[in-house]
Every structure is written in C-alpha cells, then in structure tokens.
Image (cartoon, rainbow, N blue to C red):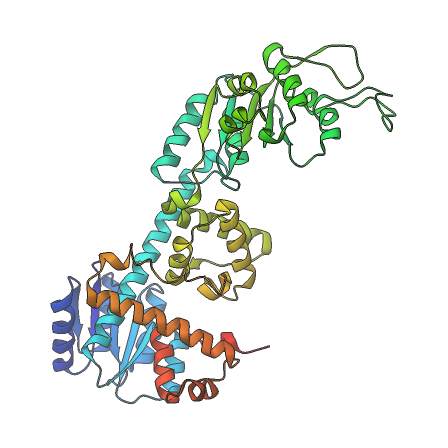
Amino acid sequence: MKGKILIVDDKRDMISLLKRIITEESEHEVHGEEDPTAALQRIREEPFDLVITDLKMPKMDGIDLLRQIKAVDSNISVVIMTAYATIETAVEATQTGAYDYITKPFRRERILLTVDKVMKWRQVIHENIQLREALAEQTGFANLIGASAGMKEIFERVKQVAPTMGTVLITGPSGTGKELLARAIHQHSARSGNRLVTLNCTAIPENVLESELFGHVRGAFTGAWKDKKGLVEEAHEGTLFLDEIGDLSLVLQTKLLRLLQEGEYKPVGSTVTKKADLRFIAATHHNLRLDIVEKKFREDLYYRLNVINFELPPLRDRKGDIPLLAYHFLGKYNRINGKEVEEIEPAAMNALTALDFPGNVRELENIIERGVIYCRGKTLSLRDLSLDPGSESEFPSMSDEIARMSFKDAKEKMTELFHRRYIEALLRENNGNISRAAEKAGIQRQYLHRLMKETGVNSEEFKQR
C-alpha cells in the first residue's frame, strides 16, 4: 500500500534522514514539519496515514501532539521517537494511542520495518471497510456469504432457478452451508410467503422417520393415540427441504419416489391417499452415484432429485471468502453476546486463511464465536481465537506467501513470527512475569521488552486473574 507520511521533528537533519531512508526503499509520499503546531494544522487540512514525531520538541512535545492528532483523526497511526527512553514514557505513549515507540539512535531496518507494519495495518483497515460493503450488498441472500467466483456463480444460478418449480439437489461436504442455500432458494421463489419445512434424515430414528415425513392416523402403532400431520402436509404450497437424504432407507426412498412422481402419499396406517403441492430441495454430503453402485440409493430417485444440481465447494477451495465470512460471524456474535469487537488483527486473519477447515464454514463460525467471547477489547487477536496449539497456522505456507517474497523479506517475516510465537509461549509459561520470562529465556529483560514492543505482545494478557 502506498501511503502518505508526515515527519515532525525540530531538527531539519533528522527529517531529511528519515525522508531519505523511507523514500529509497518505498514509494510512500513523505513530508516534513519542524514546528508541531504547523504539523497539526497540516493534519487538519490533508489526509495522512502515518505521523512519525519526535518526543522532545519546543512548543509541544510528542505526547501532546499525539493526543491532538487523535482528536483530529483517530485513524492516523502515530510513531514516537526519542533519545530519552524510559518505560514510563513508553507506557504513556502506547496508552495514549501510539502505534509504536522507537528509541534513538535507531537502526535503518527498524524504521523501515515499522513503516511497513503500519502500512500493512492500514491496508487491513481498508480491506475491512470493503468487506463490510460487500456484506451489505449481499443482504438479499441472508446468511449465504461469499465473494469468490464460485459463490458468485451460485448466487446467479439461485436467481435463475428459484422462481421455477424444478427439484434441487445440493451436494457438498458437511458444514459448507447446504441448508443456507436451500433457504436462499426458497426465499427467492414464488413460494416464499409459505413455509420452508426442514427434515434432517439423519437426526431421526428410522422407525420414526416415516411418521414424521408422512404423518400417521390414530392406532397406526403403539403410542399413536391421535392423528398427526406429517411434514409433507405442513409444507403444502411451500418448500420441503430433506437434508442428508443419502441416509434415507431404501423403503422410505421408494415412498418418497412416489411423492415426487405423483404428488401423492399415504400417512402411516391410513388407506387414504393424500395430495401434496410441494417444491422439493434435497441435500447430502454423500456421493450418491457411488451409493447407487453399492445399492444404497435408488437410481430412479436420484434422477428425480437431480433435476438442478448445486455443488457447494469446501472452504479450503474458496479461501478468499474467509475474511468476508469471518466479519459476518463477528457481527453475528457481537449481537448475540452484547460485545463490540470491531476488527480482526492481521495475525489472526493470516492464521484463519492458513487453516484447511475440515469442518468448513461451520468450523470457522465456531472459531469466531469463541474468539468474540474471549476478546476483551475491540480487536480480535490471534490469542482470542484459541486455535489448536499444535497448529502452525500463524506461519505462512512455504509454498504460498513465503515463496513470493525475496529471501530478505521472507527471513524477516519468519523471524518476526518466530519472535511473537516464542514470546507468547514464554509469557504464558511464566504467567506474564517479564523478569522471570527473560531469565528463563537467558536474555536481558530490556531486550525482551524491546521484542515485545516490536511484535505487539502485551504481558498483561498472560497474567492469571
């Protein structure tokens, strides 16, 4: 991301040095001001992504300037530089809203790394805004979320298929949102004013399933002390959705075939034939063609069901949808739990997009729900997600992200990630005690402090309460 940076320092040589360091390695637009009052006026008049300011200046120090910048635009990132480094000043700067705190004399690499981290964070904020706009555009599909090419094609087909009476078969792995797709088809159909009745063919014992589906008359079996309407009758003039139809017994498959062919059925124990006006949607994670070969599913029923087929891809095949889905679930569980989590930090989003999600969208939803519950602030962190400790998901795949980097950038990226993961484990083991953690690691306490600052790790999160 190409950004706009303002350097504020009463020493002109320092402004020139920082300008040269940043512009030699990037395409960022860099400006300088020696007077903090003039800098503040410029911030009011022009948009800036990052302000790098000295701490000790005449007229106004860096902390005061930071406060006033945040009052003008809270989204501007501010980095404070000082040769008078103390822990108290660092804490005050970060509590006031500074993105980072750099001590003089600084290394050239430290400045460039900080600028790069800020711009990546700004890019995430920009992408978050785009994600929310994309979510707003999809209100017509309720909770069926996706912006990948495959999902866009599914949305277009829903618009085309929904107004018809065609029977629909939805296939795909468990957790991909087959029921959500069925609801979207019903909501966009001419029958949307009537009921969508759902039956999970796996959830109900086989000896009860026929009665649930077709109903029964009084005395049909022990315990049938009165007539009962089945789901077929309840769905009259609406839509009947049969989930996991691949688990239906061959006996019930035969009776369902008659319903599909003739629009007729008999309640259990009845001799009276009833008529049903239904739109049929079925779903399964089974390979029904294989089930036909193995004599587990009727071939004629398969062709009756498979008039229109939707195949939902696993989440690992549409990873571009993960941020969109994550923010959708973030909003959902904010409302349910009365929370106000606004953002997902880059490290957490990187970890999510690196997962394979064997449980698909349902697994992602569970992770975000847990994260919202654990989150104490407004930003969902990697730690809040409580991913499997054995997972290396926060590290980019060697064949993907890392392979597209130069050796220097890849080494820097992996080093930064190693530092964060090691420090988090170290602090967790020592209950957030920095002195004990430094001693255990065999490093100076001040060096551990610096690593924590560079990686954004807060020891307070690891203290037992």
407 or 280: which is nearer to us?
A: 407
Estimate the x, y position of residue 256 in percent, counting from the top left. Answer: 64, 19
Which sits in the foreground, 426 or 92?
A: 426
**Side of 278 where 96 appears, left or right:** left
Quarter where residue 153 is shown: top left
Residue 437 falls in which quadrant of the image? Answer: bottom left
Q: Tell me the quadrant of the picture where the C terminus can be found.
A: bottom right
Query: What residue is rendered at 46% in x and 49% in y?
Result: 357
Which of the two residues, 238 or 151, is positioned nearer the viewer here?
151
Residue 434 horizontal side relative to residue 100, left or right: right
- Which of the 4 image quarters holds residue 248? top right
Vertical comparison of 35 with 321: above or below = below
Asked if residue 365 is positioned above or below residue 67 in the image, the reply reads above
Horizontally, residue 116 falls left or right of residue 431, namely: left
Residue at (36% x, 68% y) in the render = 71
At a point 36% along the width and 46% down the height, the residue shown is: 320
